Image (tube, coloured by chain):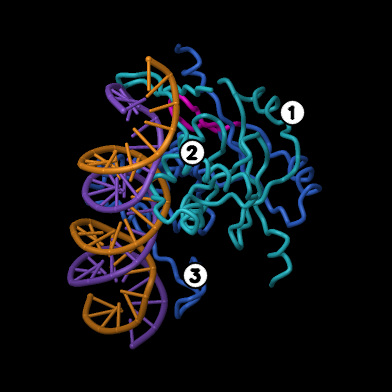
Chain colours: A blue, B cyan, C purple, D orange
Amino acid sequence: MITVIEIKKGGLKDFMVLKKSKQRDAIKAYLMSRKDHPTADQIYTELREEHPNLSLGTVYRNLTLLESIGEIQRFQCGTNSDRFDGNASNHYHFICDKCGSVHDIPLDMQKSLQELAQKHFDGQIDYYLTYFHGRCADCTKEV
Amino acid sequence: MITVIEIKKGGLKDFMVLKKSKQRDAIKAYLMSRKDHPTADQIYTELREEHPNLSLGTVYRNLTLLESIGEIQRFQCGTNSDRFDGNASNHYHFICDKCGSVHDIPLDMQKSLQELAQKHFDGQIDYYLTYFHGRCADCTKEV
DNA sequence: TCGATAACAGTAATCATTACTGTTATGATT
DNA sequence: AATCATAACAGTAATGATTACTGTTATCGA
């Protein structure tokens, strides 16, 4: 199977044939195995144990690539580093304002909210991202 | 009137008495006069015309301070710079994925969504941020 | 007017992320 | 299996947003 991806306008070519790489597979697999939405640096540090020559640039390049072909999600949530999620489907996130952890919320996206917002906005709303904030279960137990 | 603000633990003191400054007033006033949620650099560039000696560090310091006392809002929305909003009340934002502009959506926050999410999450949800994406009115007119 | 210190301008440092460079791996074609 | 084009790599340098530092100035209560 050949995977062809589009390249943003500007260069000479407008497409690219993907070649497989052990590094990309490892990054994808790692991300799929986790539910804590790690940062690029966390992924890099973890994978270095198995792949000592792995480069941080490679991690970033592949995360960006995987995101561009819709296999993973990247998002900012107030912390200083971007977070990555192996679950590419649209879903809700919770950010603990105390410990910074990020959790999934198993709840269907509310189409009604988007429809409601659309009634109040002139442009065209395609999707929405919601970040719930508060304290995670662990942190509510502490003072 | 004296404004006293708390300082995060770690230093010798745990409070600070605010003194007024022309620069902070100008930053706040500028932010209040706009609806386009400018970046720190945009604020800096604009205000330099009136205040030629204004420093970018001063802009950042005051934005952080104003945010910490709840007078303005700071948020990330996928663009590479943080955005600032003179309207500190909880409201919805729309980000145009084509031109990057940020708009307000005049819609009350849906308490029901938070309640719904709370039913599916163990921790304590205090608030939520939602970013609608799509194309703004101007951009829907273009190809 | 004085004294304590918050705030400043200017600059250096930090940190996440992206870009560059020479080398290696992939995969289609001979 | 050998060749060839090029995607991907490791390693490193560069970028850009933000924060921290330093010596000076402004604010404000005493």
* Gap in angstroms between the C-alphas marked 2 and 1: 24 Å
On whether residue A104 falls in the magenta region, the answer is: yes
Instruction: Give the magenta range.
Output: A94-105
Relative to B70, say whether B84 is above or below. Answer: below
Q: Disc 3: which chain?
A: A
Q: Secondary structure at mark 3?
A: loop
Q: State the residue lying farthest toward the right.
A: A119
Residue ID for mark 3: A7
Q: Quadrant of residue A70?
A: bottom right
Q: Amino acid at mark 2?
A: Gly
Residue ID for mark 2: A78
* Gap in angstroms between the C-alphas marked 3 and 1: 41 Å
Q: Secondary structure at mark 2?
A: loop
**Tag of residue A75:** none
* Gap in angstroms between the C-alphas marked 2 and 3: 29 Å
Q: Nearer the viewer, residue C17 or C11?
A: C11
